Image: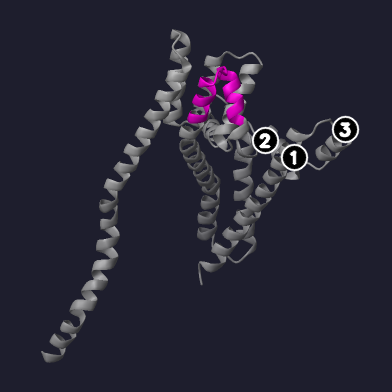
Amino acid sequence: MFFLIPALVFISVSLAVFAGYRLWHQQQTVKERIGQYKEEPDEEQDHQAAAGSSQLKRGLTRLAALLTVKEKGPGYQKLRRQLLLAGEPGKLKPQEFIVLKLTISALTFVLGIILPVSLTNVVVLVAVSWLLPDLYLQQKIRKRQLAITLAIPDVLDLLTVSVEAGLGFDAAVARVIEKAEGPLAEELRRMLYEMRIGKPRRDALRNLSERTGVGYLHNFVTAVIQADQLGVSISKVLRIQSQDIRRQRRQKAEEEAMKAPIKMLLPLVGLIFPSLFIILLGPSILHFMATF
């Protein structure tokens, strides 16, 4: 009962902020998808969309403008890297993400002061609310990298077939973007856009590797850059990379399967064995105690 009120305060504040952010993010996603399929620009709709933009985003932007952060500092660069690996959720900048954390912590502190909560519990809740956005960002990064890792072999197969059919590398990437979905397709679309506006293919591929942070994709980018510099056939490189990535994934799965018995040992010893001993030895112990 003592920790019930602080827990309810923390959960309510976190859910409210998270729900507001998710609602704004869904609205932005719908607007972006509608903009992709809109044939002619509608000035009235654009004006209404601009007028109905999220108050949360604008408030974070205004507060971030007042926040002085050393952009060359290691903490800022690390946060910027994490947001990039997470796919830039909500198009948040590092300053805006810091303001979001401060807002959540401030709301938690205010509610903790208003409600009858001890100072120690308020401090604990504020610390947890400060760390919660970082945990969400780490989970977002892992989920996104896993989705990219699972999609790489199929995308490479489609890219290989397109190149072998006679398409150039840029045209093959455009064809893959039409068929594929997910974070990897979005990153390929961004890479293709960079190449179309004049950025060299080598730099666009390296940016693709930096934005994802996936080892398989880094090896693929390195192989394609070397093939482009040495004049090697792209189709052969793509097929070899696809086969190599599937082989590495199979080896990774076998490695995880071999680790499973060791991971099962702890719950087996801590949970199953004590219950088994109680069932088998319990009657004997009770009989022994009753006898002596």
Q: Residue at x 24, y 70 (%)?
A: 274
3D distance between C-alphas at marks 2 and 1: 24 Å
- Residue 119: percent from left, percent from top: 54, 59
Q: How far apart in space, not on screen, are marks 1 and 3 (Cα)?
A: 14 Å
- Mark 2 or mark 3, which has the lower sequence index? 3
Residue 177 lies in what quarter of the image?
top right
- Tell me which numbered mark, 1 or 3, is placed earlier along the sequence: 1
Report the residue marked by disc 2: 64
Q: Amino acid at mark 1?
A: Lys
Quadrant where the C terminus sits is bottom left
Q: Is residue 124 above or below residue 244?
A: below
Question: In this orientation, which residue lies closer to the viewer: 137 or 100?
Answer: 137
- Comparing 201 with 165, the one in front is 165
Q: Which residues are magenta?
A: 157-177
Query: What mark, if any, has residue 43 been given in the picture?
Result: 3
Q: Secondary structure at mark 2?
A: helix
Query: Mark number for residue 31?
Result: 1
Q: Position of residue 198 (x, y in %)?
A: 64, 13
Mark nearest the camera among 2 and 3 is 3
Label 2 crowd bin: few (<14), some (14–19), many (20+), radius 10 Å: some
Q: Give the x, y percent position of residue 199.
A: 61, 14
Secondary structure mostly seen in magenta is helix
Q: Counting other residues with Cα less than 10 Å from the Cα at mark 1, is it few (<14), some (14-19), or many (20 or more)?
A: few
For marks 2 and 1, the one nearer the N-term is 1
Tell me the SS state at disc 3: helix
The single residue placed furthest to the right in the displayed view is: 44
Secondary structure of the residue carrying numbered label 1: helix
Q: Position of residue 25 (x, y in %)?
A: 67, 44
x 78%, y 41%: residue: 53
